[in-house]
Image: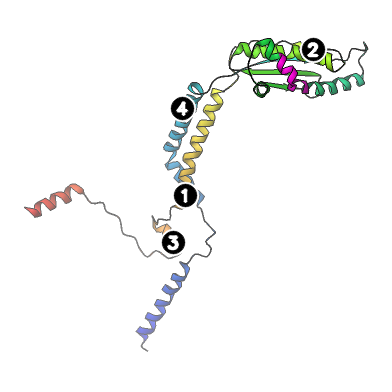
Amino acid sequence: MSEKFKGAVTERQPAENRLRVLEPQSNDEIEIDLVALFYRLLENAIWILLTAVIGAVIAGWITVFLITPKYSATSGLYVMNRQDSAINLADLQIGSSLTSDYSEVFSNWHVQETVLQRLGLDYSYAELENMISVKNPTNTRILYITATSIYPDEAKGLADTYASVAREFIAATMDTQQPSIFMEALRPSKPSSPSLLKNVVIGFALGFLLCAGIVVLIFVLDDKVRSGDDVEKYLHMPLLGMLPHQKENRRAARAAREGRKK
C-alpha cells in the first residue's frame, strides 16, 4: 500500500466519525438558545405590540357594546344581644354565632317568596339567589346584603327588602330579637361590572402572550440552517469556508435575456 493511499484512508476516517455525530443522541431533548430567542422576539416586537393593542381594542369593544352592565347595592344588618345592658365577651361570642346562623336565612324559600311578592318580581328562586350575596366580615356581627341587577333601582330595592324581610323572619322563627338595620342601600350611580379597564388590560395581555407564543413556537420548530454558526452548532462539523450570497439584479438579467433574443 502506497503512502498516498494510506493518507487517503486516514483522511476518510474522520468523515465517517462526523457522520456518526449527526445522529441525535436523544429525541426528547430540545436545546433552546435563549439569547437567539430574545433577539427573535425583538425582531417581532412591532407585531407583538400590534397584536396586543388589537386584543385590547377588541376586549374594550366587547365590554362596551356586547356585555350588559350590572349594578350593585348593599344594605347591612347588625346582630346584637340586648338582654343585658352590659356587653361582655360571652355576648360577643353569641352575637358572632348568630350572625353565621342568620346568613342561612337569605336562602330560605319563604324569605325569597316574600321578597318577590313585595317587589312584584317574577324571578325564580335560583335566579334570585344568584342575585344576592351575604358577607360577614371576620370578628364582626354585621351582615352585608349585596343585590346585583341590570337595573339600579331594582338592585337597591332587593337589598333593602331582603334586609327587612330577613329581620321579620328571624324574629318570628328563631325566637330572638330582630337585628338592627345597620345600613340602608344607596341607589348605584354607575355599574359595578364589567370593568372596562380590567377587560382592556386582560385583552392586551392575551394578545401579547398569543403573538409572543407563536413567535416562540416558530423559533423552536425552525430547524433551518441559516448561518455558519448553525452548521457548527447543530451538525457538530467544522466550517471550512463560506461563499457570499449575491442577489441577482432582476432588471439587468431581464435586459440581458432580451438582448440575447434579439
Give the alpha-carbon distance from disc 4 to disc 1, as whole Å: 31 Å
Amino acid at circle 3: Glu
Give the alpha-carbon distance from disc 2 to disc 1, as whole Å: 71 Å
Q: Residues within 10 Å of mark 1 (few under 14, many from 20)?
A: few
- Mark 4 or 1: the one toward you: 4
- Mark 2 or 4: the one toward you: 2
Q: Secondary structure at mark 3?
A: helix
Q: Secondary structure at mark 2?
A: helix
Q: Residues within 10 Å of mark 2 (few under 14, many from 20)?
A: some
Task: Pick the residue in front: 48 or 182.
Answer: 182
Instruction: State the image quarter where residue 121 is shown.
Output: top right
| Left or right side of 240 for 106 | right
Give the alpha-carbon distance from disc 3 to disc 4, as whole Å: 45 Å
Tag shown at residue 232: 3
Tag shown at residue 127: none
Give the alpha-carbon distance from disc 2 to disc 4, as whole Å: 50 Å
Q: Residue at x 52, y 27 (%)?
A: 200
State whether the magenta stretch is mostly helix, strand or loop. helix
Amino acid at circle 4: Val
Instruction: State the image quarter where residue 91 is shown.
Output: top right
Q: Residue beneath label 4, please?
A: 57
Q: Residue beneath label 2, please?
A: 168
Amino acid at circle 1: Ala
Q: Secondary structure at mark 1?
A: helix
| Left or right side of 202 for 239 | left
Earlier in the chain: of badge 2 and badge 1, it is 1
Q: Residue furthest left?
A: 262
In the image, residue 108 lies in the stretch drawn in magenta: yes
Earlier in the chain: of badge 3 and badge 2, it is 2
Q: Position of residue 40 (x, y in %)?
A: 44, 45
Q: Position of residue 12 (x, y in %)?
A: 40, 77
Tag shown at residue 36: 1
